Amino acid sequence: MPSIRKPPTMADVARMAGVSPMTVSRAFKRDTSVSQETREAVRRATEELGYVFDSTASNLRSQRTDFVAVTIPSINNANFADTVRALSDGLSDKGLQVLLGYTNYDVREEERLIEQLLRRKPEAIVVTGGKHTSRARKLLSNAGIPVIETWDLPEDPIGHVVGFSNALAVREMIDHFVTVGYRKVAFIGGDADRDTRGSDRRAGFITAMEDHGLDATRLIAAGPPPISMREGANAMGRLLEHFPDTEAVICVSDLSAFGALTECQRRGIAVPDQIAIGGFGDYEIGAICVPSLTTINAFAAEIGAKTAQLILDVLDGSLSDSAGVITIRPDLILRQTSR
Amino acid sequence: MPSIRKPPTMADVARMAGVSPMTVSRAFKRDTSVSQETREAVRRATEELGYVFDSTASNLRSQRTDFVAVTIPSINNANFADTVRALSDGLSDKGLQVLLGYTNYDVREEERLIEQLLRRKPEAIVVTGGKHTSRARKLLSNAGIPVIETWDLPEDPIGHVVGFSNALAVREMIDHFVTVGYRKVAFIGGDADRDTRGSDRRAGFITAMEDHGLDATRLIAAGPPPISMREGANAMGRLLEHFPDTEAVICVSDLSAFGALTECQRRGIAVPDQIAIGGFGDYEIGAICVPSLTTINAFAAEIGAKTAQLILDVLDGSLSDSAGVITIRPDLILRQTSR
DNA sequence: TATTCATCTGGTAACGATAACATGGATGCA
DNA sequence: TGCATCCATGTTATCGTTACCAGATGAATA
C-alpha cells in the first residue's frame, strides 16, 4: 500500500529518534562524531519511517553534489566503456558518482551536453578528446572545477590531460609495417570531418607514410564515425577493388579491422599472406578472432583509473590544480594478421 | 583568468537585466510566458555574467530532478548499451536525463546502487532484470516513483515491465534445433548462481530439452558472468573434450558463441557440419563473422525505446500508474552456424 | 583543584531556485 | 461601456539539508 502522504524528512527521523535534525544529518555521514547509540537510534528511526536521504537538499546546502561529469562519444564502444568503468570504480570509493553523457562524435552535441552537465554542478568534468567548440571551451574554463581531457593530447589543453597521441600511435604501427617490408599501405577510417581521434589517426597515417617516402593516398572513408564492423567490411571491399595491390591496411579501430578481416575471408583472400591488417584499441575480439589481430593497445582502463586518481588528488588538495599532462604510452601488439 | 569570487546567481542576472529573479527563472524555461525582449535581455545578462543555471537549487524547490535512474549489469555490454542509448534518446527530448549505474551482475551491489540512486530523487527508475534482494524490492516499491523492470518477465513485478522470457527465447531455438535434427545439444553459460538472465536461459535450455525427451546435462559453466569471448572459447574446448559427440551448442550470448566458434576454427572443427552453434543477443559480431552466427534478437533498443515511452506516458499522466507489462517477442535468427 | 581538550549535541540561518498567489495593463466580446 | 480573459511580471515564502557557531559533558593534564 503506497502511502499518499509525503515522504518523511530528517526532521521526522530526528523526532522519532529523540535527537535534533543536525544530529541525524551527522549520523548519515561517515566520519562525523556521533555516539554509537545515537547512530543506532537514528538507523532504527530511518528504517521504521522508510526515510530516504534527500541528496537534492544536501547538494544545495553543502554546495557539493559528488557528481563527476563525463562525456564520451558513444556508450556503445568498448574502449570508452572500459575507461568509464575504471573511472567510475576509482571514484566510487570516495563517494563520487559518474554522471555520464554521450556526444555521438559531434562537437555541437558535446557543447550542448557540457552545458547540461555543468548545470548539475559536478565536482569535476572529464571530456573525451581535445577538440571542442569555442563556447564549450569557454564553459569548461569558467566552470571553476577541474577539467580533464582524455584520449588525446590537445595542443592547448583546457586543464588536465590523461591521454596519448593518436597520430603517433598509428605512426608506430606504420614504422613496424615498413620495417617488415610493407610498402603499399592503406587506411580505413570514418569521414575525416567528425571523429577527431579517428581523424588524428588518419593524419598520423598520412604524415608517417610520407615521412617514409611512401604513397599515402590509399584512403578509404567509410562514412560518419563510429565505423562499425560492417562498414569496415564494406570499406575493405572498396579497397580491394580500388587498390587491389595493397599489401597492408590499417583500420581506425579493431571493430572495422575485424569487419575488414571477415570480408577477406568471404572473398577468399589470405590474411596476412595476401594482405595484412592492423586495428586500433585492443578490443577483446582482436585477441580471440582467427587469425588474431595486430593492434594498438591504448590502455583504455588505465586512462580511466589515472583520471580517477587525478580527480581525487586535485579535489582533496594534495595536487595543485595547475594543469598537468599524464601521458599514456600505447603499445603495439603484433598478432597474426600481420608479419 | 579564472575568477575567485563566487559564481553569479539568478539574482545577479535579474539585476543586470533589470527584471525580477522570477522572470529570469521563467526566461530559462521553454513554455512560460515571457516577452521576447525580456528573454533577450536575460540572455544577454546571462552571457555577460557567464551565469550557469543551478539545477541543485531548482531540484530542491521544484521537487523535480528530471533524472531517470537506470541500473544495468555492466556498462561493457553492447545489448544493455543499446537499451540505454534508446532509453536515453527517448527521454532526452523531454528534458529527462539518465542517471546510470551498474551492478556487476550482483544483486547485493544492485541493492546498494538502487539506494544510492533513489537518494538523488529520480522521476522514475529502470532496473535490468526481475530478481532483487528483498530490501531492494522494498526500496523500489516505497520510492513513490514509477519502477520499470526490463530484460525479463518477473513472476511478481514491482511495477511496470518491459521485457521477455529468457527461458522461452532459448526454448524457441531448441525447438528449431530439434526440428532440423540436432539431438545432442549442449549449453555454455556462466555459473548459475549469479547472472539471472543467463540462469533463466540455462533453465530454459534444460526444461525445453527435457520436454523433447533429450539429455539436458551437457552444461558447461564458464565462470561468473559476464562470459567473455575468451571464456566462451575455453568453454568450447572443455565441451569438445567432455562431450566430443555434441552436435550443437547454445551459448548464453553471442560473445561467448563467437569465442566458441573461434575455438572450433583453431581446432579445425567445421561449423556447422561437425557442430552447430547458437548465440543470444544478436550482437553485430554475429552478423558479420564467418560463418555468421545463428542467434536470438532480443530487441535491446526496442526495450529502451518502449521503456522511455512508458515513462513519459506515466509521468504526464496519460497512462495510469497501474502496473503494465509490455512483452517483447524475441526473434530467432538463422544464420550459417546452424542448419 | 583548576584548566585544557576532545567528544557529542543543538540552534539558527542559509544554499538558490521557484510554487503559489497577486497585479496591472491590454484585448475581446456582448 | 463593462466585464471577463489573457499576458507579462512581481512578491513572498519555502523546498530539506548542513555550515557555522556554541554549549555541555567528561577525561586528561598541569
Image (tube, coloured by chain):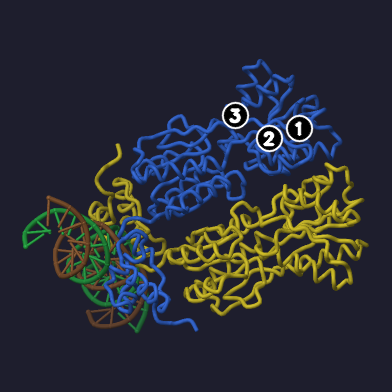
Chain colours: A yellow, B blue, C brown, D green
Q: Secondary structure at mark 2?
A: loop
Q: Are marks 3 and 2 on the same chain?
A: yes
Q: Quadrant of residue B23?
A: bottom left
Q: Residue A135, relative to residue B77: is it above or below?
A: below
Q: Nearer the viewer, residue B326 or A149?
A: B326
Chain letter behind tag 1: B
Q: Which residue is disc 2 drawn over?
A: B279
Q: Nearer the viewer, residue B276 or A252?
A: A252
Mark earlier in primary sequence (1, 2): 2
Left or right placement of residue B334 versus residue B304 in this view: right
Position of the N terminus of chain A, as image quadrant, is top left
Disc number at residue B337? 1
Where is residue B144? Give x, y as percent.
Answer: 34, 45
Chain letter behind tag 2: B
Q: Are marks 3 and 1 on the same chain?
A: yes
Do the CB atoms of the residues marked 1 and 2 lie less than 8 Å apart?
Answer: yes
Q: Residues within 10 Å of mark 3 (few under 14, many from 20)?
A: many
Where is residue B43? Give x, y as percent.
Answer: 39, 72
Where is residue B333? Give x, y as percent.
Answer: 67, 32
Q: Residue at x 53, y 33 (%)?
A: B328
Q: Residue at x 50, y 47 (%)?
A: B87
What is the three-letter code of the residue carrying label 1?
A: Thr
Mark earlier in primary sequence (3, 1): 3
Q: Does residue B116 appear in the picture of this structure?
A: no
Left or right placement of residue B111 versus residue B283 in this view: left
Q: Secondary structure at mark 3?
A: helix
Disc number at residue B169? 3
